């Protein structure tokens, strides 16, 4: 449902000019702590938040998908009693625990930052979207408890019980990401409350929790997690293959995560289409930025590549009517342009556009790689044997991380200047405290160290000798 | 008892759990520092690692729980606290990064990285609870006004009360850790370590108790309102804390480590409840009552129902975890004693 005058939540009065109403509401909404304050370092505050989120989201992928990869390996062991599967599962689970621990701390930082950097956002709307976070807290609890029981439980619990203690981890992971993404969906499509004289009232927590945006975002992110974790883990074994280690252990180590990612990659393209159509419906300005569409157009073309300058895309490849077809499945459908909102309510077009195109390009590439792999299995009952395939497979991990980041940049920067779409701007939400650049510098330094240390530890773990397949 | 009161109780429960569980994990960092070199030190460090490894992440989640319930049920108070106390919270956050990651990495990191990881682990284990405690002290002393970064960014927490509560947060963790580790050591069959941590627990208990009592004098000068509350409405709970503290010492003396564990946790919990009880009905003293700060009724109901359902799931999961831990099934084997063969299984 579009966030305009006919919003059934009844939060917006009917009006001939929804934009004007929204702008005036936006001014009224920033208020629980007393309204906007001076903050000359808004950009650094946003960068700090973006850095912390962008870092954490990579780890989240492993939190969500790695347990499934590990459990598949352990499940194969339980079925076949081939010790090789167990060895892989055990080894992977140790890396999983390290990544989980890192995710615990980087996730905590986010909770702090929400309040430290965006107090007005939390104070004004915390009671609307907060319920989702409260539920996420419980999901996180369950995940933290069972990850540890699972990883410490090797050899100490019966094989069956051990496998069972692993099952709550992905369930909690799915639930947790649903709840967190529900908040992001809500920021994009704020529902579940009324705004009376700028004050939030009549909160409907469940309506906020299950906003329209949550579903495609959750599915898109879940699949992204499988792509990142699957390709990244498989990449380690693709690297080993290229270095000549082509025994069965490495082949299976490659096949399990790569197969999972390869099955997901084509599906992600379809989910991406669903997400784009939902954005077209609920956030036409974001779509206009993604496509560099300056003016509202009937039968809008799709422009690939190029650079947006002065109201048009320079050097792009135009496909007539394609945008109308993609966004609304109708070649002559009207697509809203950037001109529908005042200039100060438009996101930076090129950041959003380039990020979107990078995501789509990588996603398509990964789907192709997946198709090659699945085709090889279908035709020869085995993986491809070309070194080029394995070189691409090594790159697929980092590439999927780039696509993940690009996707989040698309949706987050594409929402600007709003923190709560059309209701509160980031400059109304930001803290009045000084020292934001110092915090940004410190966190950047700490995260650089943390990245190096995490990678070093994982490389070290990967190099540990095998325990012997017995 | 209103819905808002129930939500405030949830927060205090979460804080209590965080203090008695995660507090001890921070305190373990101090004993890591005091473990010394040589085989005994190695054994002590292995004991700490074995005791903390399976539980620290779950214990840490209590902090997340407190934060999310706080901002959902009392959003204006949360925005005010987080923006005014950005400095100590930021420093605590950095401490949390270092503490968690160095602990996770040291098992997997190489022998060359171990001393550096250990040093960072110890430093962040002491600094994190200090800054979190200082932030709590600022709230308790009524130095957080309503508004976006409306309070003094430094003076609100960097004062005798903030320093006292910060120091108490560190010391109670150190004390709890020693008591818990004595019990863990006995379970692992390491009587030498159990004796060592018993001694340490007795000393830490005496020091912490003295600071807590002496701290009341600091509060009388620096935060009269808080002092009056703790010696007024909160007095029964403060006395209960002292009694539990003495009981812990007696139990430690008699080497009854299991009951000592419970008594030590009760001593810490009682102080937190004494503060909370004496501060009611204020959430931010002098600024905002619990009732005024509360979110709308539907949000409070949602959180309470969610907490009931989620809490039941988490309670069952935690019970499973702690049963495995306390029965020693997740323990790691300690390195051998210098003067003996392998430890008693």
Image: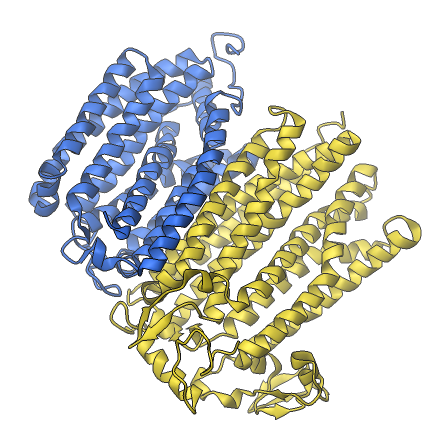
Chain colours: A yellow, B blue
- Compared across the picture, whether B97 is left or right of A365 comes to left
Report whether A291 appears left or right of A6.
right
> At 52% across and 39% down in the image, what residue appears?
B105
- Taking the spot 30% from the left edge, 28% from the top edge, the residue there is B265
Residue B254: quadrant of the picture: top left
Point 76% across, 55% down: residue: A262
Q: Quadrant of residue A468?
A: top right
Q: Is residue A453 above or below residue B330?
A: below
**Quadrant where the image shows the C terminus of chain A:** top right
Identify which residue, A277 or B267, lies in the foreground. Answer: A277
Residue lying at 75% horizontally and 36% vertically, measured from the top left: A76
> Residue A276's x, y, as percent?
62, 73
Q: Residue B46, relative to residue A428: is it above or below? A: above
- Asked whether residue B209 appears in the rendered view, the answer is yes
* Front-lying residue, B305 or B153: B305
Report if residue B115 is visible in the image: no
Please determine whether, in this image, residue A98 is positioned above or below residue A19: above
In the displayed image of the protein, which residue is found farthest to the right?
A380
In the image, residue B172 lies at what x, y percent?
A: 27, 32
Q: Is residue A46 above or below residue B60?
A: below
Percent across and percent down for residue A25 are: 35, 80
Which sits in the foreground, B156 or B114? B156
Residue A253 x/y as whole percent: 75, 42
Residue furthest to the top in view is B340
């Amino acid at each position: 449902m579009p966030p305009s005058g006919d919003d059934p939540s009844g939060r917006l009065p009917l009006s001939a000019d929804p934009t004007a109403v929204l702008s005036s509401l936006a001014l009224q909404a920033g208020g629980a702590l007393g309204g906007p304050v001076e903050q000359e370092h808004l950009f650094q505050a946003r960068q700090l938040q973006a850095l912390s989120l962008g870092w954490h989201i990579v780890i989240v992928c492993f939190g969500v998908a790695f347990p499934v990869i590990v459990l598949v390996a352990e499940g194969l062991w339980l079925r076949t009693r081939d010790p090789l599967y167990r060895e892989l599962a055990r080894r992977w689970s140790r890396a999983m625990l390290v990544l989980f621990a890192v995710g615990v701390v980087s996730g905590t930082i986010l909770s702090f930052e929400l309040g430290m950097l965006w107090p007005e956002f939390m104070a004004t709307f915390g009671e609307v979207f907060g319920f989702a976070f409260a539920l996420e807290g419980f999901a996180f609890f369950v995940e933290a408890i069972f990850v540890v029981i699972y990883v410490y439980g090797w050899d100490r619990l019966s094989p069956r019980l051990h496998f069972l203690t692993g099952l709550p981890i992905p369930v909690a992971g799915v639930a947790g990401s649903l709840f967190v993404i529900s908040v992001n969906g809500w920021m994009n499509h704020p529902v579940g409350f009324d705004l009376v004289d700028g004050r939030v009232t009549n909160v409907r927590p469940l309506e906020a929790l299950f906003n329209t945006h949550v579903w495609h975002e959750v599915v898109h992110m879940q699949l992204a997690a499988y792509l990142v974790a699957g390709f990244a883990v498989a990449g380690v074994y693709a690297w080993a293959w290229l270095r000549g280690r082509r025994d069965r252990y490495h082949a299976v180590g490659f096949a399990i995560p790569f197969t999972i990612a390869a099955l997901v990659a084509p599906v992600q393209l379809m989910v991406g289409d669903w997400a784009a159509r939902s954005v077209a419906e609920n956030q036409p300005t974001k779509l206009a930025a993604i496509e560099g569409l300056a003016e509202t157009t009937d039968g809008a073309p799709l422009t690939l590549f190029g650079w947006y300058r002065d109201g048009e895309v320079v050097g792009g490849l135009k496909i007539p009517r394609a945008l109308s077809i993609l966004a609304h499945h109708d070649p002559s459908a009207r697509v809203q342009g950037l001109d529908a909102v005042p200039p100060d309510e438009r996101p930076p077009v090129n950041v959003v556009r380039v990020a979107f195109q990078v995501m789509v390009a990588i996603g398509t590439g990964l789907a192709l790689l997946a198709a090659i792999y699945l085709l090889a299995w279908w035709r020869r009952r085995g993986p491809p044997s070309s070194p080029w395939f394995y070189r691409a497979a090594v790159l697929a991990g980092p590439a999927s991380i780039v696509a993940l980041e690009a996707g989040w940049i698309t949706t987050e920067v594409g929402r600007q200047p709003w923190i709560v779409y059309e209701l509160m701007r980031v400059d109304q939400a930001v803290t009045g405290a000084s020292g934001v650049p110092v915090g940004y510098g410190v966190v950047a330094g700490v995260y650089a160290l943390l990245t190096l240390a995490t990678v070093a530890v994982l490389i070290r773990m990967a190099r540990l000798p095998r325990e012997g397949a017995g | 008892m209103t819905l808002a009161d129930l939500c405030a109780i949830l927060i205090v429960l979460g804080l209590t759990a965080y203090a008695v569980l995660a507090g001890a994990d921070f305190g373990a960092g101090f004993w890591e520092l005091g473990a010394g070199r040589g085989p005994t030190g190695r054994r002590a460090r292995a004991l700490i690692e074995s005791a903390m490894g399976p539980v620290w992440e779950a214990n840490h989640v209590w902090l997340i729980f407190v934060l999310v319930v706080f901002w959902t049920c009392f959003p204006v108070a949360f925005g005010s606290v987080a923006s005014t106390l950005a400095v100590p919270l930021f420093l605590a956050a950095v401490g949390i990064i270092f503490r968690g990651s160095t602990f996770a990495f040291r098992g997997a990191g190489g022998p060359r990285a171990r001393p550096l990881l250990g040093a960072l682990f110890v430093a962040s284990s002491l600094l994190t609870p200090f800054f979190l405690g200082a932030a709590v002290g600022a709230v308790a002393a009524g130095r957080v006004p309503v508004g976006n970064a409306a309070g003094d960014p430094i003076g609100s927490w960097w004062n005798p009360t903030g320093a006292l509560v910060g120091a108490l947060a560190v010391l109670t963790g150190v004390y709890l850790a020693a008591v818990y580790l004595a019990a863990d050591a006995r379970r692992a069959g390491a009587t030498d370590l159990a004796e060592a941590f018993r001694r340490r627990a007795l000393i830490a208990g005496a020091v912490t108790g003295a600071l807590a009592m002496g701290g009341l004098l600091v509060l009388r000068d620096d935060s009269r309102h808080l002092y009056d509350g703790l010696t007024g409405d909160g007095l029964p709970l403060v006395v209960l804390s002292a009694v539990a503290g003495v009981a812990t010492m007696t139990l430690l003396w008699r080497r009854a480590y299991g009951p000592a564990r419970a008594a030590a946790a009760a001593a810490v919990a009682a102080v937190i409840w004494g503060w909370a009880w004496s501060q009611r009905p204020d959430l931010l003293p002098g600024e905002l009552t619990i009732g005024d700060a509360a979110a709308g009724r539907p949000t409070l109901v949602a959180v309470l129902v969610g907490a009931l359902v989620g809490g039941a799931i988490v309670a069952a999961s935690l019970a499973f975890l702690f049963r495995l831990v306390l029965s020693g099934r997740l323990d790691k084997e300690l390195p051998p004693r210098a003067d003996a063969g392998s430890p008693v299984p």
